[in-house]
Every structure is written in structure tokens, then in C-alpha cells.
Amino acid sequence: MMFPKGGWELDESLIAAAHRESLEEAGVLGIVQGELGKWNFLSKRHGTFYEGYMFPLLVTEQLDFWPEKDVRQRTWMPVTEAREACRHWWMKEALDILVERLNPQQSLTEENTLSCSSCRL
């Protein structure tokens, strides 16, 4: 399981890239909110380090058809399941930061009513 991710074009902002990737990979539209952080990670495919910025998206519309529908599956799940399913440590950290931001009194060991926005398998 992965969150939508990808590069940003020279003529777009990080926010615009987050909107575009969410649409292309998960078929959701919404409001990009404050940055969760920046992580450096090694791309196994390219063998080089990249900077990854994570942003939460308040989903306002879920589309039936989107550009990568045939190669990606959109799955909604509770936060605890999303964290377990994440295969990248930096995505888990971003999810932890989001949970803390939204509900500072509740830990991930408790059941959260949040859903993992625009996850992909």
C-alpha cells in the first residue's frame, strides 16, 4: 500500500503536484492542507535519493474514472490498518504526524475514525 506520490513539474508548485498526483493515481479531488514534512528516501527503481513531501488531502470528491484507474486500486481503510499496510517508513511517519495533528490526545493504538485518504495498493 502506498499513498499517491510522484514528481512535480518545473512549472507547478508542490501543492499543484499534490492535487495532480491525487487525481491521477487515486481519482480524488480535494483541499491540500499543511505539509506534514519532508523525507529523503532511496528509489529502488532508480537507485537514487529523492525528496518526498507529504500533504494531507481533505477529499471533497471521489471519481469513478481517473487516469490510472486500470493500474491502481483505491482503498479506504482505518488509520491503524493503513499504518500496518504502509511499506515505507517515511509514509508511516507522515501518517503518525497527521494523526497527532488531527487528534493530539489519541494514540494510534486506539481505534481512529479517520480514513486513509487516497491510498493505493
Image (cartoon, grey):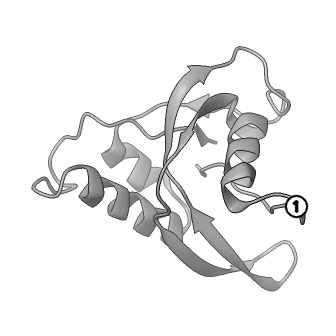
* Residue highlighted by disc 1: 9
| Image spot of residue 119 (x, y percent) | 57, 41
Left or right side of 95 for 86? right
| Image spot of residue 62 (x, y percent) | 61, 20
**Where is 50 relative to 98, above or below?**
below
| Image spot of residue 73 (x, y percent) | 68, 31
Number of numbered discs visible in the structure rendering: 1
Q: Residue at x 50, y 63 (%)?
A: 35
**Where is 61 relative to 94, above or below?**
above
| Image spot of residue 90 (x, y percent) | 51, 71
Q: Residue at x 32, y 37 (%)?
A: 114
Left or right side of 81 for 35? right
**Where is 50 relative to 71, above or below?**
below
Label 1's element? loop
Q: Residue at x 78, y 17 (%)?
A: 65
How dense is the environment of label 1, judged by Cα within 10 Å: few (below 14), some, or many (20 and up)?
A: few
**Where is 83 relative to 119, above or below?**
below
Q: Residue furthest top?
A: 64
Quadrant of res 12: bottom right
Left or right side of 103 for 68? right
Left or right side of 7 for 11? right
Q: Residue at x 52, y 31 (%)?
A: 59
Quadrant of res 100: bottom left
Q: Amino acid at mark 1?
A: Glu
Q: Identify which residue, 81 or 36, lies in the foreground.
A: 36
Q: Identify which residue, 118 or 37, lies in the foreground.
A: 37
Of the 4 image quadrants, the one containing the C terminus is: top right
